[in-house]
Image (cartoon, rainbow, N blue to C red):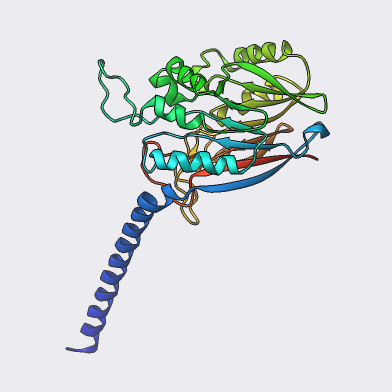
Amino acid sequence: MDQKGLKKIANRFRNISFFVLVVLLGALGLAYSYFIEPRRLVVSPAEVKIRNLDPAFDGLRIVAIGDVHGGSNAVDEEMLDRVIALANLQDPDLVVLLGDYVAHGYIHSPSRPYHTRMDVNLIARKLGGLRAKEGVFAVLGNHDGWHGDKKIADELRTAGVRVLQNEIISIERNGKPLRIFGTIDHLQMQKSWKETSAELRTIVESSGSGDLIVLQHSPDVFPVITGDLSISDELRLMIAAHTHGGQIRLPLLGRPGVPSSYGQKYAYGHIRENDVDMFVTSGIGTSVLPFRLLVPPEIAVITLKAGN
């Protein structure tokens, strides 16, 4: 065989080898993102400097847990026990639960519209084990609404969790109030954004004064309560979930899919916009696809700092 023929064979071999390598790496990535990363529960500390925060709340520690999706890939009873134990170890002042406690099955019918992969009572009882100096507060998410907000809220309340649906509670430090405003899920907001903002502003105005933190399942509500639609000039922080941090983050390419009307903008972490801060957690469970890649399940520990 001449040299030209040998080169052709060598090139073909290289092409086949490259293809096999890509397939192997893809298979390894899928295996890792299905079997390993969804079980990699991490604590993600975040220090959030908040402009005009009352110094009384400097150092306040908030544990944020979103998108539990009990029964989704890797979120079994053992994982819930790990979440509770690890969250309690953070010695939080507040624990905030940010919705989507259930994961739904794939069989939908008029007689069985949405069934959950883990019993709601079990999920609620596990979350009832959370402890914080100032209390454990929850809002509901879109998956909860599909299953039945009232049923899930009742189960959480029975377990000792305070569920806030367009309600405000206040905590105090050194005689200074901090208002916690838990809002209904974004898909339950049936009015125009302008009307929704006005409605939320009315609730805030009737609650007195003091720094305000909003709990909301979806970060897409952020522009509805800030800027021209601001619900209060005392709004300091919004904490949200829903995006799962994209759930998959590819090297160099980023997050291929984020369930947000704003794409990557509100996908994860600390965002400051319209002079207000927001923190978005990647949550615990999975939804739609049972994979996580470079976005492990997290317990976010947010420490508030008075600053600029």
**Image location (x, y in percent) of residue 11:** 28, 76
Query: Looking at the rendering, which quadrant does residue 198 occupy?
Result: top right
Count of marks placed on residues: 0
Residue 72, given in percent of the width and then of the height, sits at 37, 37
Is any atom of residue 101 visible in this view?
no
Locate the N terminus by quadrant.
Answer: bottom left
Q: Residue at x 34, y 55 (%)?
A: 31
Q: Nearer the viewer, residue 243 or 303?
A: 303
Image quarter of residue 150: top left
Q: Is residue 27 above or below residue 185?
A: below
Q: What residue appears at the point 54 percent right and 12 percent down from the top-left corner?
A: 191
Q: Is residue 183 visible?
A: yes
Q: Quadrant of residue 15?
A: bottom left
Kindly give the residue lying farthest to the bottom in the view shown. 2
Front residue of 91/5: it is 91
Q: Is residue 39 above or below residue 109?
A: below
Residue 265: image location, x then y, percent: 58, 39
Name the foreground residue: 195 vs 293: 293
Point out residue 213 in the picture as x, y percentages from the top left corner.
68, 27
Of the 4 image quadrants, the one containing the C terminus is top right
In the picture, measured across the screen, residue 192 lies left or right of residue 150, that is right
Q: 164 left or right of 171? A: left
Q: In the rendered view, does 283 fall on the left or right side of 59? A: left
Q: Is residue 194 above or below residue 55?
A: above
